[in-house]
Structure formats: structure tokens, C-alpha cells
Image (cartoon, helix red, strand yellow):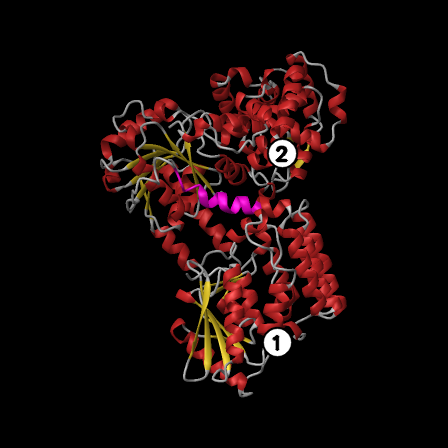
């Protein structure tokens, strides 16, 4: 029986062997495929009726790169690791590039990672204008391992190759041709025939026979190259201070420039091997697979339901959230009807959407023509008359229960019976919102994160009444608007906000007990968060922080720390970044500067709490601070999982990364917790609970796992029958 992945070879009357990579859906390079490529090449080289070779991919895709699912098998030992350098040196360099017969890569669709590396070992590349070429391996915590670090700089120059590798930034065929990465552009219909003729032209010396590994004309002089690499290192340290693989990638590129390409290949092969088994690679692979698993939802996607076609979307409220959601929708070609209460608010909402789109035009992400097309999909309304034509409504008004209840009663009256009624609330119970309707089966949460057209997460909230069809429909919409959707149960704060409400709470508690605001924020950003809890509170605004705090106080009174610090600051007209004063001062262009004045408010808050600063807390290391801020987050995440609010632990990992900016290279909040161990986390929380109160009390889920040595992410019985 044939292995799943293989190559097929066909020799034409022109004496050209066409080797086709066959491994649907993206022709990934599994070990099977690579060994089959080697066999096909060896056969082509031995056959007397073959003068030249063309390598291509089946079904309009060259290759999406090394088979990522093989990484897990390599980690677990299910498949044997090829010896170091076997693929990059023995197969691609000695056999393909060193062959006595010329080869040409015929590229269409995806040509990424190992796919591009195979093509660069050929003696020429012919591409379609829309093909995607790139080396995105750094996204997975590794470096290109099949010769890419050596060949790409020699084909496109050092600066462009660093950008493509360090930023995992693919380019289109058209740009690849301008850069010299591909030799000619043709239409998909002419691709293989043009490549065949090109290969014969090389054979008959009408076209140059080029081994990319030994090209030097695109490489900068050594002194200049070293300056470019030095700058790249500084940028990598600045943008990813906790990651070593971008620096290793730069070292490997430098080795090839300084000591020659063969030395570079060996350094690459050894570095790739080491990084493949690193914690960063394992974490980023976990994120890769977990992101794809969020759309598998028991009780919804396993029922054989097909998503219904959503042809028109209505959005209620043109504020920051409503305008952001509308922007995301029209960017994905959904016609949008924006409703506001009066002309002034409607025009302001439309202006916000225009500004969002114009920002994309300025950054070169959108043409003027595309801008006009997107804007033409937007219309405004002050009443409900046009709502009879919509398939999905998303309410994005202020967090006021009575107002939302009235809106949903109106929507039930004016919208067709199949229309999905969604709310963007971030904290209010959906059953409460839909209380005055008879349509609870089509009421669902569609919780976007601000700014909605930029942030990648969409929290889909289902109640015990929400129909599976509605969930399937929203998952499809999420995918079409390029969001990562997670389906969660209905509770205060849902999954993301509830899991992270202790992030700011624990920080406020420790400030009352003597810790420095800015030291906490620095420790969190050093750990990899985009901002610390106090900078985040400033960004969100104190009004929102207090309103959501009240929701948690009402629902979880036993584990809310009632700090008076933010209310005291609000009394003095400090409300965060919008008022230019919060925990930080904001003078030029949103730049946050520490403000010594906050000590006055902190002392007042301490005195109201009746707390004396703890001298021990002032001596804590960054690691200790991170644990004190994040272990309560893990504790709450365990509760969310135990109550069946989240379907699986990996969904919470994705929620923490895409919703709150938790560093992806740590794998998400639950995987990071497992890397530390339930026993250690439980011990620390229990110790703090004794010293600082019930806010830190470990939950039963965490206690059980600590006692039995079970990973936090292992499914519990309650998750299997997730509460809806």
C-alpha cells in the first residue's frame, strides 16, 4: 500500500522527467515524500532517456513545507530522526543541486519552508505571479533546516533574506521575480511546459546552469554584511528578548558568509536539530495545532450541520467596538448595515470606519480601489425598517442590561426568524440579555476584542438554549473574517476576561502590600506580555475597570480583592490614558511615563485597606512577581475549565495568547502552568492565601491535580460533558 505522501515521475517525449510532489492538501514534505523525492531523482539521473528534470507540486501547489504533524512524531519518537544533514546536505545539496542533469522548479500556489528550500536547490525556478514563496519556520521556534539560511541570501541579498526569515514574511511570485528568486513568470497553464523547455535550454547551454549555494553576486561585502547582521541582532533582541532562535538564525547565516556555504550548511543542520527539541518549538507547535482545534466543538461541529449563508450583517452601535466590528466585516466582503440612535452618532461611526480603512491605505495594506469597494458595502440606518433583510445582527452598545434587553426585544420583532441575534457584551449574562424574548435559541455572544478589526480572537458564547446551527454559522463567519474563534459557555466574563480578572487584581493587592507599580509592569513585559496590568488598566480606562470589577464582586465575592486605589484616582479625575493621567502620565503620542504623584493615592489606598507594607515583597525578583501575578490567573483558568465554560485546556491557551497577548512561545497560560507543575503552583497559592487572604485560595481542580500529579490540561470528567 502506497505511503500517504510520495512523488510521482513521468518522462515525456522531450526527455524531461517531471517529478510531482503528491501529499494533499498542501503537498507537505513528510519524511515519506522526501525519501520518495530522492528515489525519483536517482531514477531520473540513471535513466538514459532523461536529459533534464522538472520538480512541481500536484493540484496547483508546489509545497507548503515540511510536514508539521511530523514534528510531534519526532518529539515522541514515533518516527526516527534522520541523521544530521541527511536532508539538507545528502539529498538537497549532493543529489539535487550537485546532479549531472539540470533541474527546474515549476512553482504555483504555496512554496513555503522546505518547499522553497527544495526549489532553491534546483538550477532555476519558474513561477506564477501569485505563488507565495517564503521561509516561515521561525514562527515555529526553529530555523530553516534544508539549506534556506544559505541559499536565500545568495539569491535575494542579505537584507531581504533576513526580513523574509526573521519576520516569517512570504512574498508573491511577482516580487520574487524582481528580486531574482525566480527566473521567469508564467501563467499556471504554461508553467510546466515552460519549465521543461527551460530545463532543456540549461542542458543545451542556452541558459545558465546555476547552483544557488555558490552564488556570490547578491552578497554584500563582508564588512557591510557584518553591519547588516549586527543591526538584525539588535532588532531581534529588542523585539523578542526572550527568544534565542532568531539570534541562532542570524549566527547560521553569518557562518555561511564568513566561512563559506558548506560550513554554513553544517551549522544550520546542527542548530536545526537542537531547536527542534527546544521548549520554544514545542510551545509554538502546541499553539499551531491548538489554534486549528478551536473550531472542533462537541455538540455543534460533530452533528453534520453545514453553515448557512450570511449575506447581510447589521451592527447596532457605531462606537469603538461597533465600528471595529463593521470594519472587520466589510474587509471580508460582508455588506453591513450600521444602526445608531441619531444622525450625529451614525456619522461619527461611519467616520471611525473610514479612519480604520484609511489607516490600512496609509500603511500600504490596501489600495484606494479596495478602500472604495469596502466602503461601498457599508450603509447606515436610524430605524429597524431594513432589518428584515439581515441574517446576522451584532449588538455593540454600552454595557447596560435594560438597554440590551429592550434592543433584543426589538430585534425579535423586526428581524427575520432565521436571523442570528448576537451581542458583543464582555461580561453580562446572555440569559439576562435575552430574558424578554422568545428567541433564546438564536441568541449568542460574539465577543470581539478591541480594536475589533485588528485583534485576532472571537469568543463565541453559547447558552444552554443557543442552537448548534447558530454556533456552526458563527464559527464560519469567524473564519471568513480571519479571526480565531473559541466557543465558550455563558458566565460572568466568559473565558478570557474571567480568566484574566485576577491579573490586575493580584497586582493591586501587592501594591497595597508595598510592591512598586512600575516594577510589576516591568516584570510582566520582561516575561513577554505586551503590557503590564497597570499600563493595561490605563489603556482600557478606569471606568471600564470599575464596571467589570463590580460584576466580579457580585458573582465571585469570596475571591475579589477590593482595592480602593482606582476609585481614589478616579475621584481626582485620573481615569487612564484617555484623560492623559492614570498610573502613568501621557504627554506625547501615547507615550507612557511613570508618575511619582501616584504614591499619594497608593498611601491613601493602603491606609483605607488597613495594610502595612511587607518588606519581603520589596526584595522580590522578576520571576517571583510574575508568579504572584499569573498563578491566580492559572487558578481561575482551572475553574473555567472545571465548570465546562471552556471545552478544552488548549482553547484557554489560544484565548490567553490571542485575547490577552500572553507570549505564544510559552504555549499559552495552561501549557505554561504545566511546565511549572500543579504541585508548585498549588503550594505557592496556598502559602499566599494564608498570608494575604482568600483571593489566592487554590480551587479544587488545581488541588486535585497537585495531589495526584496530573497535568492541568488533562481533560476532567466535567469537561467531557461541558456545561452549556
Residue on which disc 2 sits: 532
Quadrant of the rendered structure where residue 338 is? top left
Q: Quadrant of the C terminus?
A: top left
Q: Quadrant of the N terminus?
A: bottom left
Mark 2 neighbour class, 10 Å CA radius: few under 14, some 14 to 19, many 20 or more: many
Check disc 1 and report its element: helix, strand or loop: loop
Q: Residue furthest front?
A: 1
524 to 253, vertically: above or below = above
* Residue 290 is inside the magenta segment: yes
* Residue 153 is inside the magenta segment: no
184 to 66, vertically: above or below = below
Helix, strand or loop for the magenta stretch, by majority: helix
Q: Is residue 601 visible?
A: no
Residue on which disc 1 sits: 98
Whether the residues at callouts 1 and 2 have beta carbons within 8 Å, the answer is: no
User: Residues under labels 1 and 2: Cα distance?
Assistant: 53 Å
Q: Which mark is residue 621?
A: none
407 to 93, vertically: above or below = above
Amino acid at each position: 500500500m502506497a505511503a500517504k505522501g510520495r512523488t510521482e515521475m513521468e518522462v515525456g517525449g522531450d526527455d524531461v522527467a517531471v517529478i510531482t510532489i503528491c501529499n494533499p492538501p498542501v503537498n507537505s514534505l513528510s519524511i515519506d515524500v522526501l525519501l520518495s523525492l530522492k528515489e525519483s531523482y536517482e531514477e531520473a539521473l540513471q535513466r538514459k532517456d532523461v536529459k533534464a528534470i522538472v520538480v512541481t507540486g500536484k493540484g496547483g501547489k508546489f509545497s507548503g513545507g515540511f510536514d508539521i504533524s511530523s514534528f510531534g512524531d519526532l518529539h515522541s519518537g514515533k518516527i526516527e530522526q534522520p541523521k544530521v544533514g541527511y536532508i539538507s546536505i545528502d539529498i538537497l545539496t549532493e543529489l539535487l543541486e550537485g546532479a549531472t542533469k539540470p533541474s527546474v522548479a515549476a512553482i504555483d500556489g504555496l512554496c513555503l519552508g522546505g518547499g522553497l528550500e527544495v526549489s532553491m536547490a534546483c538550477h532555476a525556478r519558474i513561477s506564477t505571479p501569485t505563488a507565495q514563496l517564503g521561509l516561515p519556520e521561525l514562527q515555529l521556534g526553529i530555523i530553516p533546516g534544508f539549506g534556506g539560511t544559505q541559499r536565500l541570501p545568495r539569491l535575494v541579498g542579505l537584507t531581504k533574506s533576513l526580513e523574509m526569515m526573521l519576520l516569517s514574511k512570504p512574498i508573491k511570485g511577482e516580487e520574487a521575480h524582481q528580486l531574482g528568486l525566480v527566473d521567469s513568470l508564467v501563467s499556471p497553464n504554461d508553467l510546466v511546459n515552460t519549465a521543461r523547455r527551460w530545463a532543456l535550454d540549461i542542458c543545451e547551454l542556452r541558459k545558465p546552469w546555476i547552483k544557488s549555494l555558490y552564488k556570490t553576486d547578491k552578497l554584500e561585502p563582508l564588512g557591510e554584511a557584518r553591519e547588516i547582521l549586527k543591526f538584525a541582532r539588535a532588532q531581534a533582541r529588542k523585539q523578542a528578548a526572550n527568544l534565542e532562535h532568531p539570534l541562532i538564525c542570524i549566527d547560521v547565516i553569518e557562518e555561511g558568509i564568513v566561512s563559506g556555504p558548506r560550513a554554513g550548511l553544517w551549522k544550520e543542520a546542527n542548530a536545526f536539530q537542537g531547536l527542534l527539541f527546544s521548549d520554544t518549538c514545542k510551545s509554538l507547535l502546541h499553539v499551531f495545532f491548538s489554534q486549528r482545534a478551536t473550531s472542533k466543538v462537541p455538540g455543534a461541529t460533530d452533528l453534520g450541520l453545514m453553515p448557512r449563508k450570511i449575506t447581510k450583517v447589521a451592527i447596532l452601535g457605531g462606537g469603538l467596538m461597533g465600528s471595529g466590528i463593521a470594519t472587520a466585516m466589510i474587509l471580508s466582503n460582508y455588506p453591513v448595515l450600521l444602526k445608531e440612535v441619531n444622525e450625529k452618532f451614525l456619522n461619527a461611526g461611519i467616520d471611525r470606519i473610514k479612519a480604520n480603512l484609511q489607516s490600512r491605505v496609509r500603511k500600504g495594506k490596501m489600495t484606494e480601489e479596495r478602500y472604495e469597494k469596502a466602503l461601498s458595502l457599508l450603509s447606515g440606518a436610524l430605524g429597524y425598517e431594513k432589518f428584515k433583510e439581515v441574517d446576522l445582527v451584532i449588538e455593540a452598545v454600552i454595557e447596560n442590561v435594560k438597554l440590551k434587553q429592550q434592543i433584543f426585544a426589538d430585534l425579535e420583532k423586526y428581524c427575520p426568524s432565521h436571523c442570528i441575534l448576537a451581542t458583543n457584551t464582555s461580561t453580562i449574562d446572555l440569559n439576562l440579555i435575552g430574558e424578554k424574548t422568545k428567541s433564546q435559541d438564536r441568541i449568542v455572544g460574539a465577543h470581539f476584542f478591541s480594536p475589533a478589526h485588528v485583534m485576532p480572537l472571537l469568543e463565541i458564547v453559547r447558552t444552554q438554549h443557543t442552537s448548534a446551527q447558530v454556533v456552526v454559522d458563527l464559527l464560519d463567519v469567524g473564519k471568513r473574517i480571519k479571526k480565531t474563534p473559541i466557543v465558550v459557555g455563558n458566565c460572568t466574563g466568559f473565558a478570557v476576561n474571567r480568566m484574566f480578572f485576577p491579573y490586575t487584581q493580584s497586582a493591586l493587592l501587592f501594591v497595597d502590600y508595598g510592591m512598586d507599580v512600575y516594577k510589576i509592569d516591568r516584570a510582566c513585559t520582561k516575561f513577554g506580555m505586551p503590557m503590564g496590568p497597570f499600563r493595561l488598566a490605563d489603556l482600557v480606562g478606569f471606568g471600564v475597570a470599575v464596571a467589570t470589577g463590580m460584576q466580579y464582586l457580585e458573582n465571585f465575592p469570596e475571591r475579589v480583592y477590593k482595592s480602593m486605589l482606582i476609585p481614589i484616582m478616579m475621584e481626582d479625575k485620573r481615569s487612564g490614558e484617555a484623560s492623559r493621567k492614570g498610573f502613568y502620565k501621557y504627554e506625547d503620542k501615547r507615550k507612557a511615563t511613570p508618575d511619582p504623584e501616584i504614591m499619594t493615592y497608593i498611601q491613601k489606598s493602603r491606609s483605607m485597606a488597613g495594610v502595612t507594607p511587607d518588606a519581603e515583597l520589596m526584595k522580590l525578583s522578576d520571576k517571583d512577581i510574575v508568579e504572584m501575578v499569573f498563578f491566580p490567573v492559572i487558578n481561575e483558568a482551572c475553574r473555567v475549565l472545571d465548570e465546562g465554560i471552556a471545552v478544552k485546556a488548549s482553547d484557554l491557551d489560544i484565548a490567553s495568547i490571542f485575547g490577552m497577548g500572553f507570549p505564544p512561545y510559552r504555549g499559552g497560560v495552561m501549557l505554561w502552568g504545566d511546565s511549572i507543575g500543579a504541585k508548585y503552583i498549588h503550594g505557592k497559592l496556598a502559602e499566599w492565601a494564608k498570608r494575604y487572604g482568600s483571593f489566592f485560595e487554590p480551587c479544587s481542580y488545581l488541588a486535585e491535580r497537585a495531589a495526584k500529579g496530573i497535568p492541568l490540561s488533562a481533560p476532567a470528567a466535567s469537561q467531557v460533558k461541558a456545561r452549556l
